[in-house]
Structure formats: structure tokens, C-alpha cells
Amino acid sequence: MKAAALYSAAGSLLLTSLAAAPAGGAPGSPGTAELRGTAVAVARARAAGIDFGPCPAADVPQAPAELRCGTVTVPLDYAHPDGRKIELTVSRIPATQKDPHNSKRKIPRQGALVYNPGGPGASSMYFPLIGTVPQWRRTAAAYDLVGYAPRGVGRSAPLSCEDPGHLFKAPTPSPAHPSQAYKRQRIARAKAYARGCARRSGSRLRFYHSLANARDLDVLRAALGEDRLTFMGASYGTYFGTLYAAMFPTHVRRMVLDSAVDPDPEKIWYRSNLDQSAAFEERWADFRDWIARHDDVYRLGDTPGKVQRAYDTARERLAGKPAGGKVGPGQLQNAFLTAGYYDDFWPSRAEALAAFLHGDPEPLVRLAAPSPDTAVEAENGSAVYTAVECNDAPWPTQWKVWDRDNTRLARVAPFETWDNAWLNLPCAYWPAPRQRPLDVRTAPGELPPVLILAAERDAATPYQGALETNRRLAGSVLVTERDAGTHGVGGGPNPCVNAYLDAYLLEGRLPARHASCAPRPEPKPDTPAAPGSSSRDALKGRAARP
């Protein structure tokens, strides 16, 4: 993959061995107590089931009547299933059992399909509504579509690390090559954020991690009355889906892993984020090339280099005079980062940049200015993201390691490297004990065949992760969208990918070997995507990392 070339150009990153977990001890791989506790929780959930009723506005505002909600109870600590309990919110629309192509034909129900959109920190409470989208109607006929808010998210024992009012301070800087003074400011902020997570969450903070998310998924399976789980996870959802497959292989019916995180324990999570930053440089190059090819529309330059200079000019102007008083370089960077995830955002971002540089700041302000209305949800998502990644694995605890690795990478991948580092830096000062990542490997025949979907130029979950997941899950099959980079490919606009997805979910059929699909059409410069306009928007819940 091309991210490797970036590392080579920078020279070897020479990553040192990660420091040991903080004093207090880190739990090892799943032990007897957790296995026993999971079995107890599963039995209780199967007996209790889920009492579905109208969705509270706090869970799904303005929910249609057909969407029903409930809760499932899980232990906070699976080693002590009789101790403190938490409730996870769940949503469902039953299988329609109606053939979308023949209203007189009844489709057999195949059970529940549970979906997780990633994050960590994203909810799929809206997911069941995807059944109205044409690409999903056949699946909605055969399956109850089930979404949920994982532990820590929404009203599922929510986490918080700071006052939401402090989250969207704007404008903010975003230096590609930060000064020593700026680095000291960010170190202080990371330490304060980690302390805030501990202060606001207390002793429960340590129990928000991926192994717990995998166990919660098994309890949810039982509460739904399913003997075996049909699951689709995207992005981070693929990681704890992979953990689930290794921990509970006989409980898997079918599993789709869309845009797979690299499950190599050595990658979780410090090295994964370095890989991600390198890959975002490649996607930023793709975006600049697209803008240059449409210079007749945007007038930002007819080469990628000229487009980069236009972007740099905008950053400099915003640093001197923020647009609308709220959009500085940091907000510009956030807006353009989403274009690295989803190429249907390319037209709106290019249009806003062009308008700003040609004298009209309003499109950029509408696109990039933070919205106070989303602060609570965004702060919660950020807290869960941080807690899960910090709890999941050891991280370097010495600033010099972070400084060295990110300085080297930023020389060839400046677009996202330091912003990604600042996002994760609280993990260097994390106050809770860490897990050891599970070394996922399944033997032939141990696990039903798994379908892995991946875009070849995905930046958020680089393609190497799909290859590694395929190697570790015996019998899995990989379907690749070639020369494409949109994050999350299943159920989107590519009919070839969707044909493989439908064949697997509806009939259990997989290609005999790895398959590939031609890329989806490039976005057109005159048709910017509207929020919520695609099935991908309904699935993702929020732009989530990884």
C-alpha cells in the first residue's frame, strides 16, 4: 500500500517498544472470571429479553412509529456480574418480510442484523431506518434491523471528560509543523483532558474498552433471542467484531467487516494512528488532484501543487482573520478531513474553499463553524473514543517518543499527522490501567466464513488492515473496491459491492476467492452532497475514527 512509501521517504520511524502500563496493573487476556461473568450475563439477558416500546426523544429524536426502542442490562465489570450494572439502549424495526420487487411474495425472516458504525463513540440507534433506502430493502425484508448505543455512548452509561461548552472553542490553530511552545500547550491540554476523564467518570472509566464491547455484543445477541449473531461492523466496529469472532466463534452466524481496522496487537492503537496519518496524506493528494481536474469550476489551480498553495493561502488568511469570527485553520482542517473519509464531500469542500478565496466566506462558515447544538453529543463521542483507545492497549508514556515519530512523519505527511497526535495524546497520561490487545487468530473451520469489505485507498482504515484481518480469520473472504477511498463501502452506491453483500447476508454465499469491484463514479463538481443524502450517512451516525 502507498502509505508504506511515505514511511520509506521519511526514513524508518524507529518506533521504540511501548512503555509498560501505569502502576496498578493491566489486566491480561480474557480470563476465567470474565468468561464466567459473560455466561452469567448472557443467561440473564436471554431470560429477560428486551421490552421494545416507543423510542424516548433522548434516544432517537422524532423517531417514526415503526422504530421501537428498549434496553439491555450488562455488567459494568464482567469479572463481577453481580456487581454494578449498566443499561445499553437498543433500537429495532422488525423484518418486513415483503419482497420489494413482488409485493405478493413473502420473504422468510432470518433473524436480527446488528450494526455498529464505529468510532469508538458512535451510535447506531438510527440504523434500522436504513431499510427504506433501496439498496437495503431486501435486507430489511429478511432481517430485523437492530441498532444500539455501545457502553458510554448516548444514554448507555454515558462518559464525559470535559464541559461540552469547552469543546467547540473557536477559532483554533492547526499548525502542520508546530513550534515547541505550541507543543507544550498541547501537552498541558492532553494532561488536563486525561484528568478530566478520571474526575468525571471515576472508577468506572477502566471498564470502557473493546473487550467489554465484544462481551456486550454477546449479551445483546442473547437478549434478542438469537442463538447465533448476524453482525455488520464498520470501521472501529470491525475491530471489536473481530474480537467477538475470536472470543465467541460458535456464536457467529454471519459477519460483515466493512473497512477493517488492522487487528495486529502491535498496531493497537499507537501505530494504527501513525498508519492512518500517512494514509490521509494519500487521500488529500487524491482530493487535490480532483480539484485540479475541475479548475474550470473552482479556479483553485490546475495542478495539485497549485491547489495546495490555495489551501495554504486560506489557512494563512484564516489565521489572521477567522471567517465569521469562528472559522480558523483548525476548523478548516476539520472540514477538509471529512473529505478524506468520504469523496461525496469533495464538491462542497472545494466550493467553500473557492468561494472564500474569491471573497465570499459564507459557504465556508456554514460548512466549518462549530455548532453549539451538537456539543453534548460531540463531547460524549470524544470521551468514549479516548477512553476506549487509551484503555485498550499500552501507549508510549514519554513525550519524546511521540515527538520523534510524529515529527518524522509530518515531513512527508503533514495534512493530518499532528492533529491526529493531539487527538490521541491524552493516552500518554492516562490514569486507568490498560488491557493487552487480544491476538486474534482463528483456525480453519472454527469460525463461519466472514465477509470483509474494503476500499483500496481508504485513509481512516488503511487497506493493510483488511489484508491482515483476512489473514487472521481463517476462511474469510475479502472484496475490494479498487482505486477508491470512501470509508465504508457496503450498502452504498457501488452495485458490485452490494451484490456481494446481499449474496452473503441473504443467501450465505461468498465468492470462492478474493474478489474486486471497479470503483464508484467520481463525484461531479456541480452536485455537492447534502447531509443525509446517502445510505452511508444514515449508517455512519457521525464521522468516526478510525
Image (spheres, helix red, strand yellow):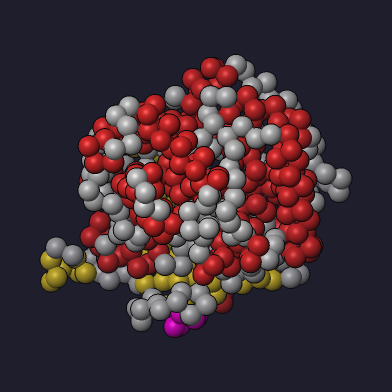
Image quarter hosting the N terminus: top left
Which residue is rendered at x = 53% and y = 24% of the image? 412
Which image quadrant is residue 74 in? bottom right
Left or right: 517 as drawn, with respect to 187: left
Most foreground residue, 248 or 322 = 322
Which residue is rendered at x = 36% and y = 78% of the image? 64
Name the spot of residue 464 as percent of width and height, x first.
47, 30
The magenta stretch spans which residues? 51-56
The secondary structure that most of the magenta stretch takes on is loop
Name the spot of residue 343 as percent of width and height, x first.
34, 43
Look at the picture and state if 534 lies above or below 103: above
Which image quadrant is residue 110 in? bottom left
Residue 503 shows in the view: no
Most foreground residue, 72 or 453 = 453
Which residue is rendered at x = 30% and y = 65% of the image? 131
Left or right: 83 as drawn, with respect to 329: right
Look at the picture and state if 288 lies above or below 76: above
Which residue is rendered at x = 54% and y = 31% of the image? 414
Most foreground residue, 203 or 62 = 62
Look at the picture and state if 206 lies above or below 289: below
Look at the picture and state if 23 lies above or below 218: above
Residue 23 shows in the view: yes
Name the spot of residue 262 as percent of width and height, x first.
53, 36
Q: Is residue 140 magenta?
A: no
Q: Residue furthest right?
A: 23
Marks counted in the figure total: 0
